[in-house]
Image (spheres, rainbow, N blue to C red):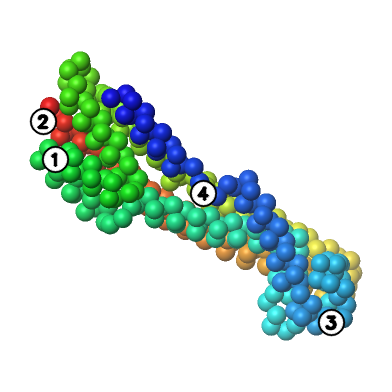
Amino acid sequence: MEKNIVHNDQQIVARKKGGLNPAIAIPLLLLLGIGIYLFLFGNPSNFMHPDQFKGAASVALSDVESKKIEPLNGSIMGTIYKGGFIVPILITFMLTVKVFAIERALVISKAAGSGNVNNFVLKIRTLLNENRIDEALAECDNQKGTVGNVVKEGLITYKALANDTTMNKEQKMVALNKAIEEATTLEMPMLEKNMMILSTLGTVATLVALLGTVIGMIRAFAALGAGGGTPDAAALSTGISEALINTALGIGTSAIAIIIYNYFTSKIDALTFKIDEISMSIQQSFAAHH
């Protein structure tokens, strides 16, 4: 029995490997965010005086803030570019949210397995009530999801304990419960991996945007003070624009991250509930038939 349990645990552990590695993905996304900021939003065609550019990456922020390089009327990209050095960081945050949202969607979809999870749970419970364990195992193989993996581990232990004569009923129930808990513990990291990134960005994006907003307002009030009785309207508007652009990007990213995080959390909770439900059925069936 112990050999079977260890063998299946190893299979479950092997399934945990994979998915995006944040240590690799996030630096790459940062480079992509900087590239988008410099070469897409900072493209000379987005500004009124493209002849001032020596290349999108070489334009100085001080030039952008001056009257010499102003965004074209209606050019959102040029306006965003004037948001300052915080903008590429916020772009990276947005890209990270999108990439890891897609990654989590694929993983959780795969974890749900084939077919309807509710129908699978009902079918397994019916088979357990009729003590048709082999058919229940076949259903787990067909389900190919997290719930099926945990149930399969429980049913393999169920069969082994049913033929065991060295333990009493209470010991068997403890062993069965332990096997199911271990299988669940091994499955959950796959579902929860990278969720912390979405949760963190839901908060951090707003704080970084607030930093950009404060910097923009400092620039605006500095321009107001430097002008004495006649403030530099261009510098003042640039500072306010920088503040508002960072605010918009940060709040938008944060809102999307929070919505996606809560959505995936509800999906994981639903799968966890199904695992708990069917685990209880396995234990009740074992207690009734053995």
Depth check: give the residue in front, 60 or 54. Answer: 54
Q: Secondary structure at mark 1?
A: loop
Q: Is the residue 251 above or below the residue 7 in the image?
A: below
In the picture of the structure, the residue carrying the numbered disc 3 is 49
The mark nearer the N terminus, 2 or 1, is 1
**Depicted 238 relative to depicted 272: above or below:** below
Sequence order check: which comes first, mark 3 or mark 1?
A: 3
Residue kind at label 4, given as amino acid type: Gly
Q: Amino acid at mark 2?
A: His
| SS for dot 4 | loop
Q: Which mark is residue 289?
A: 2
Amino acid carrying mark 1 in the image: Arg
Badges 3 and 2: C-beta atoms under 8 Å apart? Answer: no
Q: Position of residue 122 (x, y in %)?
A: 18, 49
Do tag 2 and tag 4 residues touch (Cβ < 8 Å)? no
Location of the N terminus by quadrant is top left
Horizontal side of 94 relative to 180 (left or right) equals right
- Can you see residue 170? no
Evaluate if marks 4 and 3 touch, with contact meaning CB atoms under 8 Å apart.
no
Q: Mark 1 or mark 4, which is nearer to you?
A: 1
Residue under numbered circle 4: 19
Mark pair 1, 4: CA separation = 36 Å
- Pinpoint residue 166: horizontal percent, then vertical percent: 20, 15
For residue 207, side relative to residue 225 (left or right)? left
Disc 1: which residue: 132
Classify 10 Å Cα crowding around label 1: few (below 14), some (14-19), many (20 and above): few
